[in-house]
Image (cartoon, rainbow, N blue to C red):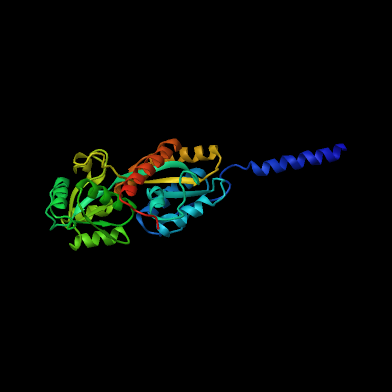
Amino acid sequence: MTMRRLFCFLTAIFFSLGSYAQPWPSKPVRWIVPFPPGGAADVVARLAAQKLGERLGQPGVVENRPGAGGNVGHAAAAAAAPDGHTLLFTVTGIVTNPFFYQGSVDPLAELAPVIQLSTAPLVLLAAPAFPAAGVADVVAAARARPGAVSCAIAGALPQVACELLRAHAKSDMLLVPYKGNAQALLSLLAGEVNLVFDLPNTALGPAKAGRARALATTAARRGQGPFGELPLIAETIPDFEIAVWQGVMVPKGVPPDIVARLNRELNAVLADADVRRRFADSGLEPAGGTPEAFGELLRRDLEKYRKVLTEAAVKAE
């Protein structure tokens, strides 16, 4: 090989390697949000995407992919190129979906954790006419009138909460399904159902107006969020703790250094005063932490909800 050919050969290798070693991110970062635009999750995702984009120097582009309880978006993220330019904004449903929907993405096998963004408890609301001052009264009423006490279910975690309540009462409760939390709450306000487990930000208005009574929360400790003064359900029913969380995941195979950079930058986003204020306004507590901690949360919740839903004989459809 002549010196000229050797030089051209080495130059080609150099530029070829360079094309694979481009700095990240080299283009806009896509955020797949498995919910429709305008909802509470979408608002948080857009805030996080904007703030992360400012730190990375590349815009965050939100792509709403709703459907099948989030599975449409989960599948799209799992199938994306593992180059760090596609993120999945996810919620607790990613670990409950496998028990409700056949063909759900396996969050531990097909995706990789980046960070937990937030956490919030559910609030147990009672209709004004339902005679219960606390959780013990709810349990007593369910035992006294099997099948008469109704609990609205809209989504996976409210159903888990109602199933846990029914299991503790050791008596039949009427679980009434709704398409979404908004419909379930409206039914409670109209007196059509007795109980609903709702998110703090949507429960706050009716509770303050006296149109519903907030009895307790599913938090692990008091003082969390706008209903922090309420008793914990766990004070009456041991281990009754349910946290609604939001987080960020990426397709399996994204290089560890990119995952680490995303984690570092998103932790900084969560420390931003404006972000913390807007989270608080939505009844959310910023979380943060390492990818490993978020991965452990995923594994723990997956097993916890597997036990509850298996015992309740819930079948994936």
Q: Position of residue 102 (x, y in %)?
A: 44, 55
* Residue nearest the viewer, comparing 146 with 89: 146
Picture quarter containing residue 179? bottom left
Q: Position of residue 254 (x, y in %)?
A: 55, 43
Position of the N terminus by quadrant: top right
* Label total for image: 0
Picture quarter containing residue 84? top right
Q: Position of residue 299 (x, y in %)?
A: 41, 40
State left or right for residue 79 relative to residue 313: right
Residue 242 in sight from this viewpoint: yes
Who's the residue at 17% across and 58% down the image? 148
* Residue nearest the viewer, comparing 238 with 128: 238
Who's the residue at 28% across and 62% down the image? 183
Position of the C terminus by quadrant: bottom left
Who's the residue at 37% across and 54% down the image? 315
Residue 277 in sight from this viewpoint: no
State left or right for residue 208 relative to residue 276: left
Who's the residue at 81% across and 38% down the image? 7
* Residue nearest the viewer, comparing 280 with 223: 223
Tell me: residue 180, above or below residue 107. below
Q: Position of residue 302 (x, y in %)?
A: 39, 44
